[in-house]
Amino acid sequence: MSYAFLGDIRPYEAGYLKEIIDPGNIEKEIDTICREMADLSIDSLKFDRWDFAAIFTVAVLEVGADFLLGDPKKGLSKNLSDKNTPLGGYFNKVHGSIDHTGNPLDYQGDGFGGGDHRARTFGHDLFMFPLAIYSLCQGQFVDGFYDQKKFQWILTFLSQKDTAYAGLPFDEAILAYFAHMTADFFSVKSLPVPGFGALAHLPSRDIRKLVAKMYSDGFNLRDMVVKGMPVAASEVLIRMYFYFRNQEVEASPEARKHKRDKMLLMTHTLAALVNVGKVILTKNPASINLPMLLRVIWLTWSVVKEEQELTQRAKVKVNYSVLKNKYETLQTLVLLDESVYYTREIDRFILKKKDEFVIQFQENENIIQNGFNEVDQLLVAFTRLNQSI
């Protein structure tokens, strides 16, 4: 409300509050905080009995599929590795149809010969591809093995048949590498699991023996793809259930993702526990489902991270609420200060007008009294005039 029409009352200027904040911006700050609070989602979707039923059902299906596909010596993995089966024969033809001979990645000299040579080299480990590219560019086999507990480096430009390797330009080396890895993936033994080539070079003989045995038993990259099929199928089933079950539920994208990830984690964890138990009971480490375990680890990290983000958003929202309350308190203090200011100004205005009225009244009284005095003097003068006549 403005009191400018009263003239003598000065407009409110906030006084010392200007040093804290511009009172005109308080409302804008409150609106900004309210919008930011609305953007912070801390809601979550609850689990019900149908969710747990879906998790258990899909986990049972995943366990069943793992029993069918999880042993590299049986089922699909075995068929893919057997040249005498239709699938295995087709894969072997693909392996033979891709030209990948004559490069240092297939060196099979002393310590590297035999059908399992890929598990003993750096070059066939996909994690070691920079070294493989270097080897192809240089036309040099770079590797090593343990002899009498001592690591012996093998650096040679000649094959086991004393044929010189040809160095390749970088772009041709890239193409040759991918052609070689693709061909070997379709071979009977396929490629080793990424990282196993490095494990095969560790000082521990027990680890090297375990890597060699698992690869010999069929634990390879193609077997990982087969073992990943039950994991992928479970992902599809859980995601389909979640979509149709929650498509009409109002929730933020963060809340949806958090619940879906927890459902996936519980499903894969149940299946992984059974898989680990199977490995322990059968004493067959080659039947471990590595894609399943990696997915459990990834989902665990994802769920923990989402929980931390949810907690952090809740803390931020509480802090915003406290800040909003403080702004509202400050807004109230400004209004009170403004009320006190105008009350004081009105009191001053009334006192001033009162004083002016008293002065004016006194002046009027004096004028009236002077008028009466003049009339009295005239009456006296008329009286004396009458008496003289």
Image: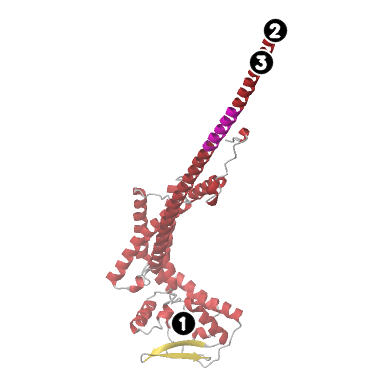
Residue type highlighted by circle 3: Val
Mark 3 touching mark 2, by CB under 8 A?
no
Measured in 3D between alpha carbons, the distance from the residue under mark 1 to the one under mark 3, in whole angstroms, is 133 Å
Q: Is residue 126 above or below residue 307?
A: below
239 or 303, nearer to the observer: 303
In the image, farthest residue toward the top: 389
Question: Which of these two is toward me, 306 or 379?
Answer: 379
Which residue matches tag 3? 375
The answer, for residue 239, to whether it is visible in the render is no
Mark 1: few, some, or many residues within 10 Å (few <14, many ≥20)? many
Q: Are marks 1 and 2 in contact (CB under 8 Å)?
A: no
Q: Which residue is mark 2?
A: 386
Looking at the rendered structure, the kind of residue marked 2 is: Asn
Q: Position of residue 268 (x, y in %)?
A: 37, 61
Residue 275 position within the rendered picture, expressed as x and y whole percent measured from the top left: 33, 66
Label 1 vs 3, first from the N-terminus: 1
Residue 148 on the magenta segment? no
Q: Position of residue 140 (x, y in %)?
A: 53, 88
- Residue 122 is labelled as 1
Of discs 1 and 2, which sits in the foreground? 2
- Determine which quarter of the picture holds residue 307: bottom left
Q: Please provide the residue range marked out in magenta.
A: 343-359
Q: Amino acid at mark 1?
A: Phe
Q: Please, what secondary structure does the residue beneath circle 1 have?
A: loop
